[in-house]
Image (spheres, rainbow, N blue to C red):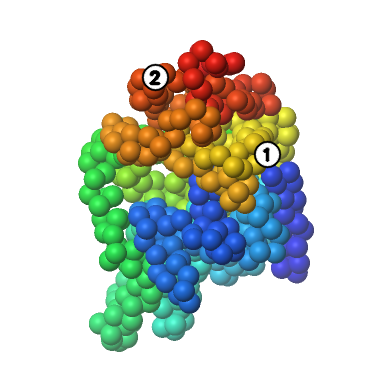
């Protein structure tokens, strides 16, 4: 009976995720990971980070997309791009498919953890309407949402291993742990959190001696070796990448104390305060400003806090740690995430974005089991569940309405489609140079590679030697088209350096086109160099 209810739940999820799927605009991080897939399908040389590849059947396949992000999205998106064409819809159909798998895994894990199929239905329903899960799923590549599916799959495998002692479940879980690390290095947070929650559960439940005894009977050295091998197989592309480049270790070493974006990793308390603030925002859904507005479900954090207290009460009262496990995972990930190689972005929490729903469903199921047949408790639980479902559903609908008006803001604006269309029509026979971050990959993908801008801004705010070396050949009248961000949203400001190179040649810039979001705000521009005194529309 319970399983049948999954059908309408999944239908609601698909409705929420597939509606106006091309919005917001294609983000740089989405495009960056699927450009190599497009190139492979078109039998073009695939771009590879640090030029790290493996050659199979005469084709070079990239091993990663960043020092700490693997190429799973690149390869898993291939069948969608092949079937649906090189399009944003194809990319996001892949992301929605991963989200659908995540919902099913969350339902299965929750049901198995509580031995109650209705718990799985409730967890799935909470995910189906949750604004964070819905909109992060739609842009799953942007947040590496595949880590959420891998994490729940690994947790479920190890739950099965704990209950059945069948070694194959442990091996499957170890492989998924390795795969998750390859997908994104911060998956290590989730691994540590899952182990921490597991140790807490067996300690609180009084099962620690029995568990240790069982492990001793299983020839732990040999078994541990097998698990290490399974994990290494899952992370094999990342291992090969570092054997070739050492990139991951270089990145960690360079950003250990202070991250690339200036985060002080030794500032424990301020970083912790930031992360717990983001956790509350994750729960209420109030972080999608770029959809056109910010909406919140204030009831969600309140109910989540009540559920946490109930889980603690159940743990102390009955030595039943099941309800506490999902909460422990979330809290441990939050604490671990204060150290980063990039920035304290809320998108990092995509690795655990399904756990708030799992936590509420499991805590509710265990509380109902403990207090039934108390009708008042049953009504209260139903009201709390309905409050969260209704609040999240309304918030998701409001975000969709705002998105339909805005088309996306900032780097998520659908203005990127206008820019790509203009370039496809006007730049097919001219070099195009991306003078700032966020421009090249979307244009390359949206034009199916007919326009492939060269990025010259570099990834170091201070060192512009690479910029000088690359830009030189383009300093001729009307030779190249230069793409820029609007002055108020510049990230790497290369305009002064650019002027210092072309002005001695008696050249000036002429604006060819500007691209605006739906509110009329300028976001991007295209310029060319012309002889001094001939520009028709000089930049101010």
Which residue is found at the position 39% from the left and 46% from the top?
334
Q: What x and y, as percent, mark residue 485?
A: 51, 28
The one nearer the camera, 165 or 130, is 130
Query: In the figure, 333 relative to 433: above or below?
Result: below
- Please indicate whether residue 246 sits to the left or right of residue 489 in the image: left
Q: What x and y, as percent, mark residue 48?
A: 42, 57
Which residue is found at the position 74% from the left and 46% from the top?
19
The one nearer the camera, 187 or 114, is 187
- Could you tell me which quadrant the N terminus lies in? bottom right
Q: Secondary structure at mark 2?
A: helix
The one nearer the camera, 68 or 391, is 68
Q: What x and y, as percent, mark residue 477?
A: 49, 27
Which residue is found at the position 33% from the left and 48% from the top?
336
Q: Which residue is mark 1?
A: 425
Give the mark, 2 or 1, whose residue is nearer the N terminus. 1
- Please indicate whether residue 393 sits to the left or right of residue 290 in the image: right
Q: What x and y, as percent, mark residue 323?
A: 49, 58
The one nearer the camera, 440 or 404, is 440
Q: Residues within 10 Å of mark 1 (few under 14, many from 20)?
A: few
- Residues marked 2 and 1 touching at CB (< 8 Å): no
- Please indicate whether residue 515 sits to the left or right of residue 239 in the image: right
Which residue is found at the position 35% from the left and 55% from the top?
50
Q: Which residue is mark 2?
A: 503
């Amino acid at each position: 009976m319970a399983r049948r209810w999954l059908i309408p739940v999944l239908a609601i999820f698909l409705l929420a995720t597939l509606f106006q799927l091309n919005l917001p605009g294609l983000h740089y991080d989405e495009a960056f990971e699927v450009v190599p897939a497009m190139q492979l399908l078109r039998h073009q040389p695939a771009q590879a980070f640090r030029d790290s590849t493996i050659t199979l059947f005469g084709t070079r396949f990239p091993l990663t997309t960043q020092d700490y992000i693997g190429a799973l999205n690149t390869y898993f998106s291939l069948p969608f791009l092949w079937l649906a064409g090189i399009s944003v819809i194809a990319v996001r159909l892949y992301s929605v498919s991963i989200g659908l798998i995540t919902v099913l895994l969350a339902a299965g894990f929750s049901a198995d953890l509580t031995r109650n199929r209705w718990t799985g239905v409730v967890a799935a329903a909470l995910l189906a309407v949750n604004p964070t899960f819905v909109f992060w799923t739609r842009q799953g590549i942007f947040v590496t949402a595949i880590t959420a599916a891998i994490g729940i799959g690994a947790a479920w495998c190890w739950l099965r291993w704990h209950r059945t002692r069948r070694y194959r479940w442990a091996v499957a879980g170890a492989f998924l742990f390795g795969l998750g690390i390859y997908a994104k290095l911060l998956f290590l947070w989730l691994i540590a959190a899952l182990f921490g929650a597991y140790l807490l559960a067996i300690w609180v439940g009084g099962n620690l001696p029995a568990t240790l005894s069982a492990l001793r009977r299983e020839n732990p050295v040999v078994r541990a070796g097998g698990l290490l091998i399974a994990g290494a197989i899952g992370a094999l592309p990342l291992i090969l990448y570092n054997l070739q480049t050492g990139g991951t270790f270089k990145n960690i070493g360079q950003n250990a104390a202070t991250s690339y974006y200036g985060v002080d990793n030794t500032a424990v308390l301020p970083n912790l305060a930031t992360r717990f603030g983001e956790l509350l925002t994750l729960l209420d859904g109030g972080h999608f400003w770029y959809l056109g507005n910010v909406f919140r479900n204030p009831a969600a954090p309140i109910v989540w806090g009540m559920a946490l207290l109930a889980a603690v009460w159940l743990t102390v009262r009955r030595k039943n740690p099941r309800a506490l496990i999902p909460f422990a995972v979330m809290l441990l990930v939050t604490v671990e995430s204060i150290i980063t190689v990039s920035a304290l972005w809320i998108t990092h929490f995509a690795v655990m974005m399904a756990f708030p729903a799992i936590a509420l469903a499991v805590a509710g199921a265990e509380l109902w089991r403990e207090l039934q047949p108390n009708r008042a408790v049953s009504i209260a639980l139903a009201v709390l569940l309905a409050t969260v479902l209704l609040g999240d559903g309304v918030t998701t609908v409001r975000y969709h309405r705002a998105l339909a008006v805005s088309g996306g803001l900032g780097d998520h604006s659908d203005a990127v489609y206008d820019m790509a269309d203009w370039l496809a029509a006007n730049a097919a026979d001219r070099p195009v140079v991306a003078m700032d971050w966020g421009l090249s990959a979307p244009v390359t993908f949206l034009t199916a590679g007919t326009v492939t801008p060269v990025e010259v801004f570099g990834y170091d705010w201070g060192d512009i030697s690479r910029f000088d070396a690359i830009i030189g050949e383009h300093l001729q009248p009307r030779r190249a088209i230069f793409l820029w961000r609007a002055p108020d949203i510049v990230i790497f400001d290369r305009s002064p350096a650019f002027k210092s190179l072309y002005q001695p040649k008696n050249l000036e810039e002429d604006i060819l086109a500007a691209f605006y979001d739906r509110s009329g705000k300028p976001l991007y521009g295209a310029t060319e160099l012309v002889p001094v005194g001939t520009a028709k529309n000089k930049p101010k």
